[in-house]
Amino acid sequence: MTDWMRQRNDTGATSRRGPSLRAIPFHAPSCPGLVDLLSANHHERLVRLGAVRHFPARAIVYREGDTADAVFIIGEGAVKSCRDLRRGRRRISAFLFAHDVCGLAEAGRYVNTVQALTPSSLYRLDLHELSRALQHDSELEFRFLCRIVHELREAQQHAVTISRRHAAGRLALLLRMLEANGAPSTPGGGVQVPMTRSDIADYLGLSLESVVRASRRLERQGIVTFPDRHHARVLDRRRFEALASAA
Amino acid sequence: MTDWMRQRNDTGATSRRGPSLRAIPFHAPSCPGLVDLLSANHHERLVRLGAVRHFPARAIVYREGDTADAVFIIGEGAVKSCRDLRRGRRRISAFLFAHDVCGLAEAGRYVNTVQALTPSSLYRLDLHELSRALQHDSELEFRFLCRIVHELREAQQHAVTISRRHAAGRLALLLRMLEANGAPSTPGGGVQVPMTRSDIADYLGLSLESVVRASRRLERQGIVTFPDRHHARVLDRRRFEALASAA
DNA sequence: CGTACAGTTGATGATCATCAATCCCTGTGG
DNA sequence: CCACAGGGATTGATGATCATCAACTGTACG
């Protein structure tokens, strides 16, 4: 078991046990940034609905094409949601962390394969029961709607990211995303990088080699260091942000 | 007024007047493909809620950053949803046609600018009233949820599309999308192309010139012809599909 | 110790962006 | 009716960036 596997226990991220939903709501903000969507009441309901399931690293949660019978909320850990293309190519459509949702299907079948990157625990919500709960509680349903809209925005952002030409910029954007989603307890501004270079490549639409070279470039320019494969640290915040937000 | 502007009147697409929602539902299919999500009852409700608004080509529906006070459903026409980046660059996150939804906000503000490509009519649903309606009718809300999930899948597909290397493949994918969304009344397998090459470039993450060259290549290879700037016709379906689905 | 997998580096070619010049179409005003 | 202006579209030349292939290193783990 490696270092970063141990570190991703929720040290302060969630105070409550059980499933949790977070999103930036689409109505005007009462407080800025991500908001916990579930009231204690709703939380209770989902706890009764859901079964916690643990997955070791690399375990498959579900496969593309499987009959969709459940929705999952990430509790701990990190997973990837991917799709296989021709010729052994693979595209990762999202990395998911605590509070994220996956398992949305098309016509009764999952459209992505979801696989654990680190040992993870997921809350499994039976689709039929969830549907019934949503039918009976439009407030809860509204929270789910907010969450899906949130994911829609992230997917659009992802599309913008990978349409960029420069590999270093794409990588910076991923690192910034990891900063936002990563374990908040990391000391000294370090960033957890739970996925492999190959996963990063599939997410950014680059080759593995280009990811390595982009990493090297960031290090050579003194913008980011990579103490090891699963950690990064931003050294020059100014230039880092310039890279991450440049067109 | 050009030819293609005239042709996009709903000739058979919608039997009812008023707003319409379509999506591939995520539960197991009773019938394949896109499904009308609104019952006559729900439809009534939205008609009372919504006001039809007409926009000439190039008119702005709303701007990125505006206070979000309404959600829109496209009735007729085609619009683009885009975002401005640095240095005059622009990214189009989606082209929207009849039955599509736009106006989803983040923290009370629109995150995209929506602009009409052709003369269009949109149903404007006041956000507060819509929220109330969704609160009171969890069935209606569920339909909206289906629709947003549908858009999420399309956004993910878009990300996959523009991560491809070959310009011709990306273009083929866009044409196939236009075939699916376009006016179904077009005779002889022609495809309506309501947007400019520049819009296509911004959508596919290419330069304008690359779009032109990709078009030329498709013509030279006898796969697609472009009778004029706003029409395309697939000649060799076999090779076209190969291009559109290749990794 | 040896296998397997992740990561690294270099050389080469493919593809695209950019710049610049030009064309084409449309609408406008003389 | 024609000249002109302007945006969109087209084409060519050049350089930047990335993918690919291949060889190699490092690390984890039985």
Image (spheres, coloured by chain):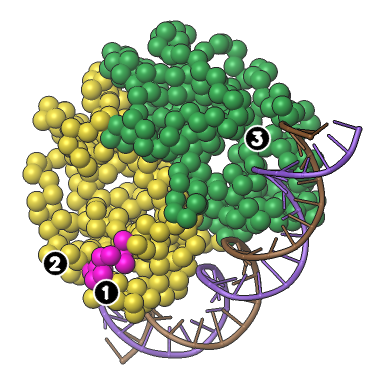
Chain colours: A yellow, B green, C brown, D purple
Is B236 positioned to the left or the right of B31 in the image? right
- Dot 3: within a 10 Å radius of its alpha carbon, few (fewer than 14), some, or many (20 or more) residues? many
Report the front residue among A89 and B5.
B5
Left or right position of A22 against A85: left
The answer to whether mark 3 and mark 2 are in CB contact below 8 A is: no
Range covered by the magenta-colored residues: A228-241
What residue is at 8 percent from the left and 44 percent from the top?
A15
Depicted A230 relative to depicted B137: above or below = below
The image quarter in which residue A139 lies: top left
User: What residue does disc 3 label?
Assistant: B194
Across and down, in percent, residue B236 comes to: 77, 46
Image quadrant holding the N terminus of chain A, namely: bottom left
Protein chain holding label 2 = A
* Residue A144 visible, this angle: no
The answer to which of marks 2 and 1 sits earlier in the sequence is 2
Residue B37 falls left or right of residue B12:
left
How crowded pointer 1 is (Cα within 10 Å; few <14, some 14-19, many 20+) is rated as: some
Q: Secondary structure at mark 1?
A: strand
Q: Which residue is mark 1?
A: A225
Q: Check disc 2 and report the residue beneath it.
A: A188
Q: Position of residue D6 (x, y in %)?
A: 66, 43
| Whole-percent x, y for residue B225 in the image | 78, 45
Look at 52% across and 13% down and name the residue there: B18
Q: Camera-side residue: B1 or C6?
A: B1
- Closer to the observer: label 1 or label 3? 3
Inter-mark Cα distance, 1 to 3: 47 Å
Name the kind of residue labelled 3 in the image.
Pro
